[in-house]
Image (tube, coloured by chain):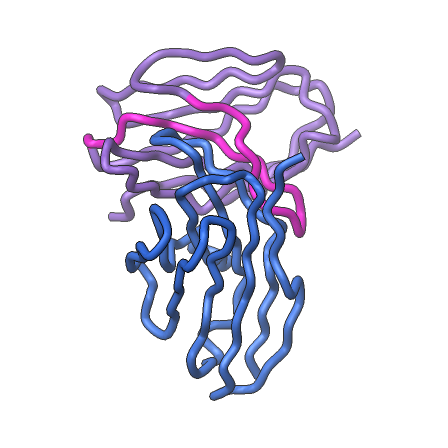
Chain colours: A blue, B purple
Amino acid sequence: DAEITQSPRHKITETGRQVTLACHQTWNHNNMFWYRQDLGHGLRLIHYSYGVQDTNKGEVSDGYSVSRSNTEDLPLTLESAASSQTSVYFCATSGANTGELFFGEGSRLTVL
Amino acid sequence: QKEVEQDPGPLSVPEGAIVSLNCTYSNSAFQYFMWYRQYSRKGPELLMYTYSSGNKEDGRFTAQVDKSSKYISLFIRDSQPSDSATYLCAMMDYGQNFVFGPGTRLSVLP
């Protein structure tokens, strides 16, 4: 079965450190997204990509970057982690121009 | 005003009850309307998907969209403890811009 794998599932880091969250999908979907989920805010879009070498900023992109070198992977990098980036991060994909997003299991990040 | 409003709950109901979950929105450009279910410590999964106005039924679940009122609903009949989860409404325009509601936490008590 096709799936989306996020790693690590849990990470604790310190303020100022660089952190990379991995997302690997076997759906062969062109569209990939990174969201963060916080209490009271729901899911907020960080970055998204519609294909290889394509990346775009979402609603809350400051302090985050992504790169898309192949169809399967969209790693999310926090260049200098801040406590405000403590959150649960979800990777998602979609294969067509519909509302069907497929989500990974999430990565819980704590920045101390 | 937020683009999508949703009562965060928590909502507690007894097993077998009919549950009504609702969202309002402000952007008339939204054309696709969805409900996602999210179990604790899991990613959201698509539950219902509707294009434009109207009703859609799938088993115990019914989704309604009223574009004139900018209001969408999800009804769960004969609710079960396994329905306990957070329900997120989501909307998308033709430009593939998704917006999610904050989610309503539902508990169905046995």
Q: Quadrant of residue B99?
A: top left
Residue B76 versus residue A104 in the image, above or below: above
Decide whether residue A94 is among the magenta residues: no
Residue A87 horizontal side relative to residue B49, left or right: right
Image position, residue B17 (x, y; %): 66, 20
Return the residue nearer the eye: A68 or B77.
A68
Task: Write the residue at 40% across / 54% down.
Answer: A44
Q: Quadrant of the C terminus of chain A?
A: bottom right
Question: In the depicted view, which residue is nearer to us: A108 or B20?
Answer: A108
Q: Residue furthest left?
A: B28
**Looking at the image, is A94 positioned above or below residue A71?**
above
* Image position of A111 with respect to A89: above or below: below
Give coordinates of residue A92: x percent, y percent.
Answer: 49, 47
In this rendering, position of residue B54 left or right of residue A90: left
The quadrant holding residue A22 is: bottom right
Q: Is B23 or A29 nearer to us in this picture? A: A29
Instruction: Specify the segment rendered in magenta.
Output: B28-49
Q: Quadrant of residue A69?
A: bottom left
Q: Which quarter shows the N terminus of chain A?
A: top right
Q: Judge from the rendering whether residue B39 lies leftward or rightward of residue A68; answer left or right.
A: right
Please give the name of the residue rendered at 44% of the width and 47% of the height, measured from the top-left corner: B102
Q: How many dots with numbers?
A: 0
Q: Residue at x 40, y 65 (%)?
A: A66
